[in-house]
Image (cartoon, rainbow, N blue to C red):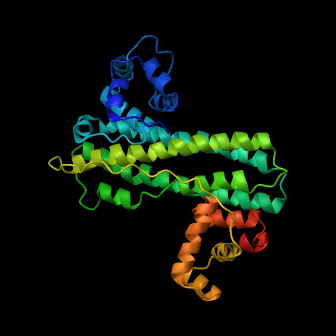
Amino acid sequence: MVKISYLCLVKLFKDNMKMAGLVEANYHLLAVLSRLGIEGAFGEQTVREVCAKNRLDADTFLLICNVYTFHDYRPGEDLLRAGRVDDILRYLHQSHDYYLNQALVLLASSLEALIAPCPPARQKAVWKFFSDYKAELEKHFEYEEGAVIPYIQSLLLGKRHPDYSIDRFEENHTNIDDKLSDLKNLIMKSLPPECDPHRRTQLLTYIFTLQRDLDRHTCIEDDILVPMVRLLEDPHRHLSPGAAVRPQEGEERDELSDREKEILVSVASGLLNKEIADLHHISINTVITHRKNITRKTGIKTVAGLTAYAILNNLIDINAAIQ
Protein backbone atom coordinates (compact mmCIF):
# COMPACT_ATOMS: atom_id res chain seq x y z
CA MET A 1 0.00 0.00 0.00
CA VAL A 2 1.29 3.42 -1.00
CA LYS A 3 1.92 5.78 1.90
CA ILE A 4 2.68 9.48 1.54
CA SER A 5 2.27 12.64 3.55
CA TYR A 6 -0.70 14.90 2.90
CA LEU A 7 1.56 17.73 1.74
CA CYS A 8 3.16 15.48 -0.84
CA LEU A 9 -0.30 14.31 -1.87
CA VAL A 10 -1.44 17.87 -2.58
CA LYS A 11 1.58 18.39 -4.81
CA LEU A 12 1.03 15.11 -6.64
CA PHE A 13 -2.69 14.93 -7.48
CA LYS A 14 -3.92 18.22 -8.96
CA ASP A 15 -6.58 18.78 -11.58
CA ASN A 16 -4.06 20.51 -13.86
CA MET A 17 -1.72 17.51 -13.99
CA LYS A 18 -1.73 15.30 -17.09
CA MET A 19 -4.10 12.34 -16.82
CA ALA A 20 -1.32 10.11 -18.15
CA GLY A 21 0.88 11.32 -15.28
CA LEU A 22 -1.76 10.38 -12.73
CA VAL A 23 -1.95 6.84 -14.12
CA GLU A 24 1.85 6.68 -14.17
CA ALA A 25 1.83 7.55 -10.44
CA ASN A 26 -0.51 4.63 -9.70
CA TYR A 27 -1.44 2.24 -12.50
CA HIS A 28 -4.17 0.72 -10.28
CA LEU A 29 -6.15 3.88 -11.08
CA LEU A 30 -6.83 2.41 -14.53
CA ALA A 31 -9.60 0.46 -12.77
CA VAL A 32 -11.10 3.72 -11.47
CA LEU A 33 -11.00 5.30 -14.93
CA SER A 34 -12.61 2.27 -16.55
CA ARG A 35 -15.50 2.20 -14.08
CA LEU A 36 -16.14 5.89 -14.67
CA GLY A 37 -16.28 5.36 -18.42
CA ILE A 38 -12.95 7.04 -19.19
CA GLU A 39 -11.53 5.17 -22.16
CA GLY A 40 -8.93 5.65 -24.87
CA ALA A 41 -5.69 7.59 -25.08
CA PHE A 42 -5.30 10.75 -22.98
CA GLY A 43 -2.69 12.53 -25.05
CA GLU A 44 -1.60 15.65 -23.21
CA GLN A 45 -5.00 16.29 -21.65
CA THR A 46 -5.17 17.31 -18.00
CA VAL A 47 -7.30 15.63 -15.36
CA ARG A 48 -9.82 18.48 -15.54
CA GLU A 49 -10.04 18.28 -19.34
CA VAL A 50 -10.59 14.53 -19.34
CA CYS A 51 -13.19 14.79 -16.58
CA ALA A 52 -15.07 17.55 -18.43
CA LYS A 53 -15.13 15.42 -21.56
CA ASN A 54 -16.64 12.55 -19.57
CA ARG A 55 -19.11 14.71 -17.59
CA LEU A 56 -17.35 14.14 -14.31
CA ASP A 57 -16.58 16.61 -11.56
CA ALA A 58 -12.77 16.78 -11.43
CA ASP A 59 -12.60 17.42 -7.68
CA THR A 60 -14.81 14.41 -6.96
CA PHE A 61 -12.75 12.28 -9.32
CA LEU A 62 -9.61 13.29 -7.42
CA LEU A 63 -11.29 12.42 -4.11
CA ILE A 64 -11.82 8.88 -5.41
CA CYS A 65 -8.27 8.66 -6.75
CA ASN A 66 -6.72 9.92 -3.50
CA VAL A 67 -8.65 7.54 -1.25
CA TYR A 68 -8.06 4.68 -3.70
CA THR A 69 -4.32 5.34 -3.76
CA PHE A 70 -3.25 6.52 -0.29
CA HIS A 71 -3.97 4.37 2.73
CA ASP A 72 -3.94 7.17 5.31
CA TYR A 73 -5.68 9.88 3.28
CA ARG A 74 -8.95 11.27 4.68
CA PRO A 75 -10.66 14.14 2.84
CA GLY A 76 -11.63 17.19 4.87
CA GLU A 77 -15.17 18.47 5.28
CA ASP A 78 -14.68 21.26 2.73
CA LEU A 79 -13.75 18.76 0.01
CA LEU A 80 -16.66 16.51 0.90
CA ARG A 81 -19.13 19.39 0.74
CA ALA A 82 -17.79 20.39 -2.68
CA GLY A 83 -17.94 16.86 -4.12
CA ARG A 84 -20.71 15.40 -6.26
CA VAL A 85 -22.48 12.45 -4.67
CA ASP A 86 -23.90 11.21 -7.97
CA ASP A 87 -20.37 10.73 -9.34
CA ILE A 88 -19.50 8.62 -6.29
CA LEU A 89 -22.63 6.52 -6.87
CA ARG A 90 -21.69 6.13 -10.53
CA TYR A 91 -18.29 4.76 -9.53
CA LEU A 92 -19.67 2.41 -6.85
CA HIS A 93 -22.41 1.02 -9.11
CA GLN A 94 -19.91 0.21 -11.86
CA SER A 95 -17.60 -1.33 -9.26
CA HIS A 96 -20.36 -3.68 -8.16
CA ASP A 97 -20.89 -4.75 -11.76
CA TYR A 98 -17.15 -5.34 -12.22
CA TYR A 99 -16.78 -7.44 -9.06
CA LEU A 100 -19.76 -9.70 -9.79
CA ASN A 101 -19.55 -10.08 -13.57
CA GLN A 102 -15.80 -9.94 -14.19
CA ALA A 103 -13.60 -10.37 -11.11
CA LEU A 104 -15.53 -13.26 -9.52
CA VAL A 105 -15.98 -15.01 -12.87
CA LEU A 106 -12.21 -14.89 -13.47
CA LEU A 107 -11.53 -15.99 -9.90
CA ALA A 108 -13.94 -18.93 -10.17
CA SER A 109 -12.42 -20.12 -13.45
CA SER A 110 -8.87 -19.93 -12.06
CA LEU A 111 -9.84 -21.67 -8.81
CA GLU A 112 -11.63 -24.48 -10.65
CA ALA A 113 -8.55 -25.13 -12.77
CA LEU A 114 -6.25 -25.08 -9.74
CA ILE A 115 -8.17 -27.62 -7.65
CA ALA A 116 -9.00 -29.95 -10.58
CA PRO A 117 -6.21 -32.46 -9.62
CA CYS A 118 -7.42 -32.65 -5.99
CA PRO A 119 -9.57 -35.51 -4.69
CA PRO A 120 -13.32 -34.76 -5.04
CA ALA A 121 -13.86 -34.24 -1.33
CA ARG A 122 -11.11 -31.60 -1.14
CA GLN A 123 -12.47 -29.90 -4.24
CA LYS A 124 -15.87 -29.80 -2.57
CA ALA A 125 -14.46 -28.20 0.59
CA VAL A 126 -12.69 -25.40 -1.30
CA TRP A 127 -15.52 -24.84 -3.77
CA LYS A 128 -18.13 -24.61 -1.01
CA PHE A 129 -16.05 -21.98 0.76
CA PHE A 130 -15.73 -19.95 -2.44
CA SER A 131 -19.45 -20.32 -3.24
CA ASP A 132 -20.41 -19.10 0.22
CA TYR A 133 -18.11 -16.10 -0.20
CA LYS A 134 -19.62 -15.31 -3.61
CA ALA A 135 -23.15 -15.49 -2.18
CA GLU A 136 -22.17 -13.18 0.69
CA LEU A 137 -20.67 -10.65 -1.72
CA GLU A 138 -23.78 -10.77 -3.93
CA LYS A 139 -25.99 -10.16 -0.89
CA HIS A 140 -23.79 -7.25 0.22
CA PHE A 141 -24.01 -5.52 -3.17
CA GLU A 142 -27.72 -6.33 -3.55
CA TYR A 143 -28.41 -4.42 -0.33
CA GLU A 144 -26.40 -1.43 -1.52
CA GLU A 145 -28.08 -1.42 -4.95
CA GLY A 146 -31.58 -2.05 -3.64
CA ALA A 147 -31.64 0.09 -0.49
CA VAL A 148 -28.68 2.42 -0.07
CA ILE A 149 -28.26 3.87 -3.56
CA PRO A 150 -32.01 4.54 -4.07
CA TYR A 151 -32.12 6.24 -0.64
CA ILE A 152 -29.23 8.54 -1.56
CA GLN A 153 -30.75 9.29 -4.97
CA SER A 154 -33.98 10.34 -3.27
CA LEU A 155 -32.00 12.61 -0.93
CA LEU A 156 -30.47 14.28 -3.99
CA LEU A 157 -34.02 14.99 -5.18
CA GLY A 158 -34.85 16.61 -1.85
CA LYS A 159 -36.92 13.74 -0.47
CA ARG A 160 -36.52 12.72 3.16
CA HIS A 161 -37.13 9.24 4.56
CA PRO A 162 -37.64 9.35 8.34
CA ASP A 163 -37.41 5.55 8.65
CA TYR A 164 -33.94 5.30 7.11
CA SER A 165 -30.56 7.01 7.41
CA ILE A 166 -27.00 6.37 6.33
CA ASP A 167 -26.35 5.09 9.87
CA ARG A 168 -28.50 2.07 8.95
CA PHE A 169 -26.14 1.41 6.06
CA GLU A 170 -23.16 1.40 8.41
CA GLU A 171 -24.96 -1.05 10.69
CA ASN A 172 -25.40 -3.42 7.72
CA HIS A 173 -21.99 -2.68 6.22
CA THR A 174 -20.39 -6.10 6.60
CA ASN A 175 -16.71 -6.73 6.10
CA ILE A 176 -16.39 -8.21 2.61
CA ASP A 177 -12.66 -8.78 2.91
CA ASP A 178 -12.31 -11.41 5.64
CA LYS A 179 -13.43 -14.44 3.62
CA LEU A 180 -11.36 -13.43 0.61
CA SER A 181 -8.36 -13.12 2.92
CA ASP A 182 -9.16 -16.57 4.27
CA LEU A 183 -9.33 -18.02 0.75
CA LYS A 184 -5.93 -16.50 0.02
CA ASN A 185 -4.42 -18.10 3.12
CA LEU A 186 -6.00 -21.48 2.37
CA ILE A 187 -4.49 -21.48 -1.12
CA MET A 188 -1.06 -20.38 0.12
CA LYS A 189 -0.83 -22.82 3.01
CA SER A 190 -3.22 -25.73 2.76
CA LEU A 191 -3.74 -26.92 -0.82
CA PRO A 192 -2.09 -30.29 -1.55
CA PRO A 193 1.10 -30.54 -3.64
CA GLU A 194 -0.69 -31.93 -6.70
CA CYS A 195 -2.01 -28.42 -7.41
CA ASP A 196 -0.07 -26.76 -10.20
CA PRO A 197 2.30 -24.11 -8.71
CA HIS A 198 1.95 -21.79 -11.72
CA ARG A 199 -1.85 -21.85 -11.46
CA ARG A 200 -1.53 -21.25 -7.72
CA THR A 201 0.65 -18.17 -8.34
CA GLN A 202 -1.78 -16.89 -10.97
CA LEU A 203 -4.77 -17.32 -8.67
CA LEU A 204 -3.01 -15.69 -5.72
CA THR A 205 -2.17 -12.71 -7.95
CA TYR A 206 -5.87 -12.38 -8.82
CA ILE A 207 -6.85 -12.58 -5.14
CA PHE A 208 -4.27 -10.06 -3.92
CA THR A 209 -5.39 -7.62 -6.64
CA LEU A 210 -9.08 -8.10 -5.86
CA GLN A 211 -8.45 -7.86 -2.12
CA ARG A 212 -6.70 -4.52 -2.52
CA ASP A 213 -9.46 -3.25 -4.79
CA LEU A 214 -12.22 -4.28 -2.38
CA ASP A 215 -10.35 -2.64 0.50
CA ARG A 216 -10.22 0.63 -1.45
CA HIS A 217 -13.89 0.21 -2.37
CA THR A 218 -14.78 0.01 1.31
CA CYS A 219 -12.64 3.08 2.08
CA ILE A 220 -14.39 5.10 -0.64
CA GLU A 221 -17.73 4.17 0.93
CA ASP A 222 -16.59 4.88 4.51
CA ASP A 223 -14.46 7.98 3.91
CA ILE A 224 -16.33 9.67 1.06
CA LEU A 225 -19.87 8.36 0.55
CA VAL A 226 -21.02 8.05 4.17
CA PRO A 227 -19.83 11.52 5.32
CA MET A 228 -21.19 13.09 2.11
CA VAL A 229 -24.61 11.57 2.77
CA ARG A 230 -24.54 12.71 6.38
CA LEU A 231 -24.10 16.24 5.06
CA LEU A 232 -27.05 15.71 2.71
CA GLU A 233 -29.18 14.52 5.61
CA ASP A 234 -28.18 17.53 7.72
CA PRO A 235 -26.36 20.33 5.84
CA HIS A 236 -25.78 22.19 9.14
CA ARG A 237 -23.85 19.43 10.84
CA HIS A 238 -20.08 19.39 11.12
CA LEU A 239 -18.15 16.20 10.61
CA SER A 240 -15.72 14.88 13.17
CA PRO A 241 -12.06 14.53 12.12
CA GLY A 242 -11.12 11.48 10.04
CA ALA A 243 -10.76 8.11 11.67
CA ALA A 244 -7.42 6.75 12.70
CA VAL A 245 -5.31 4.93 10.16
CA ARG A 246 -6.52 1.40 9.61
CA PRO A 247 -4.19 -1.21 11.08
CA GLN A 248 -2.21 -3.40 8.74
CA GLU A 249 -2.65 -7.15 8.88
CA GLY A 250 0.12 -8.80 10.88
CA GLU A 251 2.48 -11.24 9.26
CA GLU A 252 3.61 -13.32 12.23
CA ARG A 253 2.79 -17.02 11.79
CA ASP A 254 3.49 -20.11 13.96
CA GLU A 255 2.44 -23.75 13.97
CA LEU A 256 -0.76 -24.57 15.85
CA SER A 257 -0.27 -26.31 19.17
CA ASP A 258 -2.09 -29.58 19.90
CA ARG A 259 -4.54 -27.73 22.15
CA GLU A 260 -5.18 -25.12 19.47
CA LYS A 261 -5.89 -27.90 16.96
CA GLU A 262 -8.44 -29.34 19.40
CA ILE A 263 -10.10 -25.93 19.74
CA LEU A 264 -10.04 -25.49 15.96
CA VAL A 265 -11.81 -28.82 15.50
CA SER A 266 -14.48 -27.71 17.96
CA VAL A 267 -14.94 -24.40 16.15
CA ALA A 268 -15.17 -26.18 12.79
CA SER A 269 -17.76 -28.53 14.32
CA GLY A 270 -20.01 -25.55 14.99
CA LEU A 271 -19.64 -25.35 18.77
CA LEU A 272 -20.06 -22.03 20.57
CA ASN A 273 -17.43 -20.70 22.97
CA LYS A 274 -19.38 -21.88 26.04
CA GLU A 275 -19.77 -25.36 24.56
CA ILE A 276 -16.07 -25.50 23.69
CA ALA A 277 -15.14 -24.43 27.22
CA ASP A 278 -17.33 -27.14 28.74
CA LEU A 279 -16.04 -29.81 26.36
CA HIS A 280 -12.38 -29.10 27.11
CA HIS A 281 -12.84 -28.13 30.79
CA ILE A 282 -11.39 -24.63 30.32
CA SER A 283 -12.73 -21.12 30.82
CA ILE A 284 -14.44 -19.10 28.09
CA ASN A 285 -11.62 -16.55 28.31
CA THR A 286 -9.14 -19.32 27.57
CA VAL A 287 -11.22 -20.40 24.56
CA ILE A 288 -11.23 -16.82 23.28
CA THR A 289 -7.45 -16.60 23.73
CA HIS A 290 -6.96 -19.86 21.81
CA ARG A 291 -9.21 -18.63 18.99
CA LYS A 292 -7.27 -15.38 18.72
CA ASN A 293 -4.02 -17.36 18.53
CA ILE A 294 -5.50 -19.67 15.88
CA THR A 295 -6.52 -16.68 13.77
CA ARG A 296 -3.12 -15.04 14.21
CA LYS A 297 -1.22 -18.18 13.26
CA THR A 298 -3.37 -19.25 10.32
CA GLY A 299 -4.27 -15.78 9.08
CA ILE A 300 -7.88 -17.00 8.81
CA LYS A 301 -10.66 -15.06 10.52
CA THR A 302 -14.01 -16.65 9.65
CA VAL A 303 -15.54 -19.89 10.93
CA ALA A 304 -16.09 -21.03 7.33
CA GLY A 305 -12.43 -20.39 6.56
CA LEU A 306 -11.26 -22.23 9.66
CA THR A 307 -13.51 -25.15 8.75
CA ALA A 308 -11.98 -25.36 5.28
CA TYR A 309 -8.51 -25.10 6.86
CA ALA A 310 -9.31 -27.99 9.21
CA ILE A 311 -10.54 -30.12 6.30
CA LEU A 312 -7.55 -29.41 4.08
CA ASN A 313 -5.17 -30.20 6.95
CA ASN A 314 -6.94 -33.47 7.81
CA LEU A 315 -8.05 -32.30 11.25
CA ILE A 316 -11.71 -33.17 10.71
CA ASP A 317 -13.62 -35.61 8.55
CA ILE A 318 -14.65 -33.99 5.27
CA ASN A 319 -17.96 -35.81 4.86
CA ALA A 320 -19.02 -34.94 8.40
CA ALA A 321 -18.17 -31.27 7.94
CA ILE A 322 -19.82 -30.70 4.54
CA GLN A 323 -23.44 -31.70 4.10
Task: Indicate the position of residue 48 as horizontal and vertical percent values.
Answer: 34, 20
Relative to the observer, which residue lies in front, 15 or 60? Answer: 15
Relative to 136, is 112 on the left or the right?
right
Answer left or right for 85 relative to 183. Answer: left
Q: Position of residue 313 (x, y in %)?
A: 76, 64
- Tell me which corner region of the image, top left, top right, bottom left or bottom right, holds residue 72: top left
Where 269 sits versus 105, above or below?
below
Question: What is the residue that sits farthest to the left in this orientation?
Answer: 236
Where, quadrant-wise, is the C terminus in this rendering? bottom right
Residue 177, image x and y in percent? 53, 53
- Total numbered badges shown on the rendered structure: 0
* Residue in the picture at 49% in, 46% down: 215
Which residue is rendered at x = 74% and y = 44% of the image? 200
Residue 188 percent coordinates (x, y): 70, 51
For residue 50, which quarter of the picture?
A: top left
Query: In the depicted view, which residue is nearer to us: 140 or 176?
Result: 176
Q: Residue at x 37, y 57 (%)?
A: 170
Q: Is residue 185 left or right of residue 61?
A: right
Q: Is residue 159 visible?
A: no
